[in-house]
Structure formats: structure tokens, C-alpha cells
């Protein structure tokens, strides 16, 4: 029995080690964070191509007050947005149309149209082969999936309006995440881009706003859990369905807009319109920094983590401020754009850069695309399907910020042995 107890102890210790559990460690305390100072770095502007796009409302018969843009998202070289037409004297849409803009050619095309009854569509998000959205129609709210190839709409999950669902979607190229609030208790769910496998990730989510998102960065999502009275920041791998890291934090420590990848965890201590602090924690260096201070004159409306950068929708200047997390450089991404701005619907979208809707210059929105997306990738295959020695060269575009390369190969057969 002693031998089995000893082995069980080893297994338990190993499980705690490889799950990233830090239950015995001291909490990461924002009150002890080091204040970080930034200086202007114009080289950050050289990394992105910033473009403003104008949305054209095709329905010329609708009243200007009854038609508008409701959602915007992106994937790869595609930007998607939804246009609604309201009922006369109503609060819901009589129809919604989703459009796509190709950021390479500038061409626009209609993806789909939703009509038939009063509804409201929001939370539009994209993967490589489908769109996801939340629609309120009749007496229910549904998470739906539009299949690009088939041109069909499928229901991922439906909720009665009596349950007062508040669903906020996030997606990357492989997964979609959202929180549910049955009986007021938050739970986190996910599904793959096929929409066939809805899974519960955690039902131990700490109390939070119903507008909280489970952001996905490089296949990882971050959330806040309470277990046995102890609170943690949790970083979860959607692919392996396992915890990458569990970081203990002080009980009832204010933290909203939690985001993380495999290098950094970022959060703020209160929502926008207030002079709040934003924190960055390095997973590699175990270093906690306050990257925005309340007395800095920066008013954070929202922010998004993208690799080594954080994109900040800053309300004092009404500009998009970019800061580095591993360095001390900063730049105003939209400084060279003409006119005044009020940015909303901001998001850093994996494989696509950063997008936002400008309410002040409506119907304009901007897209900031990393310039490295034009690099060519060459892949060499040494055998053909018959097994004969063969040299085939394939060309592909390296998608920006991609965690996994999707090769769209155009093979050119150079030589095959007889």
C-alpha cells in the first residue's frame, strides 16, 4: 500500500506541474505592479497598413434613420459587416444583410440576407469557412452558423428569452467561445468552427459582467475562476482542452477584459470612461507591470492584445494607441487619418490585424493590416502521388499573425523521374 500511495503522490504532483497549477504560490498582486513608462516610437507605424473603408448602403428606399451598420469582423483578407433595416417605428430589423470586402482587391460582395420576421442580429464573427452570429427572433435567442460553401444557416444553440441570455462571441480560425448565465451563475462554452461539438469548459467562473468575452489568442482563451474560495486567472488551451496556466490572484481583486496568449496576460481594473489602470503579466519572466496609470491622461475605452502589442481605444484623443509589452515604444496608429473620430466595435482579429468602426465619420471603418502578410512561402514536395521521385514547387501567402499556416497551394511540377 505504501508503494501505491507513493506512486499516487508522484502522479498528483506531476498533474499539478503540467497543468500549470499555482495553488501554492503567492498571488499576483496588482498593488505591487511596477509602473511602466513609454516613449514615442514611429517605427511601430511602419508595421501596419491603415486603410479607411466606406460602407455603402444599397437600400436607397429606406429612411436614413432606419438603416445602419450593426457588426464588423474579419478573417484573413476578408472584412465582414452587417447592415440592418429597422421596422417602421420598431426596435428590430425587417432584414439584415452581411457583406464581405476583400482587403487586397477592394471588391465588395453580399454574403447572405436574413429576413422573414422581426429580428436583431449581432455578435458577428468569422472563421475560415463560416460566419457565426447571435440572433434574437420571436421568443428565443440563437447562436447560428453560416456555412460559406453550402450557403446554409445552422443553429448551434438556442435560448428562451425568459432565461435572459446575454451572449458575447469570440472566435479564431478554429474555435468560438461564449459565456452563459443560467440562474445568474456564469459558465464558459466553446465549439469548433464546424459547430458540431459544443463543450463546457468551466462552470466555476467568478462573478462577472454579462458582457464579458472569452477572448481567443493563438488558440488560448482566458477567464477567471473561483475554486475552494481561491481566485485564479486561467489560461486554457482549446485544442488540447487543458489548462496552460492557473495564476492565483488576490480575492475580489478588480479585473475586467482579461486576455492572454502564451506570453502575456493583460487586464484592467475597471471598465471604460474611467481613469483606470491596465496591467501586463509576463508568463515567461514572471513580471507584473502597470502599462497604463490613472494619472497618465489616458482614458481607456477598450483594448486588445495582439502578440507583443496592445491596441488601446483611447478616449482623450479619440485615437487608437499602440504600445509594446516587451519594450517601451508607443504610437498613435490613426494619427495621420483626417478628421475627428469616435471608434467603437474595435477588435484585434487573429489573421487580420485590427479593425474598428468610426461613429464620427460614419459610415467609415478602418482596418490596420500587418505589412508582412505579403511575404511568399515556398513549399517543396519531393514526391508526387504515384510515389515517383518528383520535384513540385508550391507557392502560398503567409497570413499575418497566423498560428498555423494554411497553404493554398498552386503546384507547378518542375521535374519527375521516368
Image (cartoon, rainbow, N blue to C red):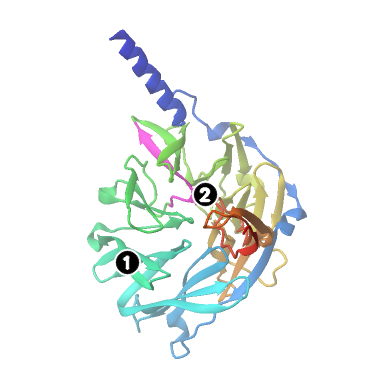
Q: The N terminus is located in which quarter?
A: top left
Instruction: Give the image quarter of residue 143.
Output: bottom left
Q: Is residue 319 visible?
A: no
- Start and end of the magenta stretch? 213-227
Dot 2 falls on a residue whose secondary structure is: strand
Counting every numbered tag in the picture gives 2
Picture coordinates of residue 388, whole percent (x, y) = 57, 55
Picture coordinates of residue 16, whole percent (x, y) = 42, 26
Upstream in sequence: badge 2 or badge 1: 1
Task: Look at the magenta stretch and give its main secondary structure.
Answer: strand
Residue tagged by mark 1? 154
- Pick the front one: 352 or 334: 352
Residue tagged by mark 2? 217
Q: Is residue 245 above or below residue 399?
A: above
Other residues around mark 1 within 10 Å, as few (<14) / some (14–19) / many (≥20)? few
Question: Which mark lies nearer to you, 2 or 1?
Answer: 1
Amino acid at each position: 500500500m505504501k508503494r501505491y500511495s507513493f506512486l499516487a503522490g508522484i502522479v498528483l504532483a506531476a498533474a499539478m506541474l503540467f497543468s500549470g497549477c499555482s495553488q501554492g504560490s503567492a498571488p499576483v498582486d496588482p498593488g505591487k505592479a511596477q509602473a511602466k513608462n513609454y516613449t514615442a516610437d514611429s517605427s511601430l507605424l511602419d508595421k501596419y497598413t491603415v486603410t479607411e473603408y466606406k460602407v455603402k448602403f444599397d437600400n436607397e428606399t429606406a429612411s436614413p434613420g432606419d438603416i445602419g451598420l450593426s457588426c464588423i469582423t474579419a478573417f484573413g483578407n476578408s472584412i465582414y459587416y452587417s447592415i440592418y433595416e429597422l421596422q417602421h417605428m420598431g426596435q428590430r430589423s425587417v432584414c439584415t444583410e452581411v457583406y464581405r470586402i476583400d482587403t487586397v482587391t477592394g471588391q465588395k460582395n453580399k454574403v447572405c440576407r436574413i429576413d422573414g420576421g422581426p429580428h436583431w442580429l449581432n455578435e458577428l464573427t468569422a472563421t475560415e469557412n463560416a460566419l457565426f452570429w447571435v440572433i434574437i427572433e420571436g421568443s428565443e435567442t440563437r447562436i447560428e452558423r453560416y456555412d460559406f460553401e453550402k450557403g446554409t444557416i445552422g443553429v448551434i444553440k438556442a435560448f428562451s428569452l425568459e432565461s435572459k441570455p446575454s451572449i458575447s462571441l469570440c472566435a479564431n480560425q478554429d474555435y468560438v467561445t461564449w459565456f452563459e448565465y443560467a440562474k445568474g451563475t456564469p459558465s464558459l462554452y466553446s465549439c469548433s468552427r464546424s459547430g458540431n461539438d459544443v463543450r463546457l469548459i468551466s462552470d466555476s467562473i467568478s462573478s462577472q459582467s454579462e458582457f464579458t468575452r472569452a477572448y481567443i489568442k493563438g488558440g488560448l482563451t482566458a477567464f477567471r475562476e473561483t475554486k475552494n474560495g481561491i481566485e485564479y486567472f486561467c489560461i486554457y488551451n482549446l485544442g488540447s482542452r487543458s489548462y496552460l496556466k492557473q495564476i492565483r490572484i488576490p480575492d475580489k481583486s478588480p479585473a475586467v477584459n482579461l486576455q492572454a496568449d502564451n506570453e502575456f496576460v493583460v487586464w484592467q481594473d475597471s471598465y471604460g470612461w474611467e481613469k483606470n489602470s491596465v496591467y501586463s503579466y509576463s508568463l515567461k519572466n514572471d513580471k507584473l507591470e502597470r502599462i497604463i496609470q490613472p494619472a497618465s491622461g489616458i482614458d481607456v475605452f477598450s483594448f486588445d492584445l495582439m502578440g507583443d502589442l496592445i491596441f488601446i481605444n483611447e478616449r482623450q484623443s479619440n485615437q487608437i494607441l499602440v504600445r509594446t509589452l516587451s519594450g517601451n515604444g508607443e504610437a498613435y496608429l490613426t494619427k495621420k487619418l483626417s478628421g475627428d473620430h469616435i471608434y467603437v466595435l474595435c477588435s484585434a482579429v487573429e489573421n487580420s490585424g485590427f479593425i474598428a468602426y468610426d461613429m464620427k465619420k460614419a459610415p467609415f471603418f478602418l482596418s490596420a493590416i500587418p505589412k508582412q502578410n505579403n511575404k511568399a512561402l515556398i513549399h517543396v514536395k519531393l514526391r508526387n502521388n504515384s510515389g515517383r521521385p518528383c520535384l513540385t514547387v508550391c507557392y502560398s501567402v503567409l497570413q499575418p499573425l497566423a498560428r498555423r499556416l494554411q497553404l493554398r497551394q498552386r503546384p507547378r511540377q518542375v521535374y519527375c523521374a521516368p
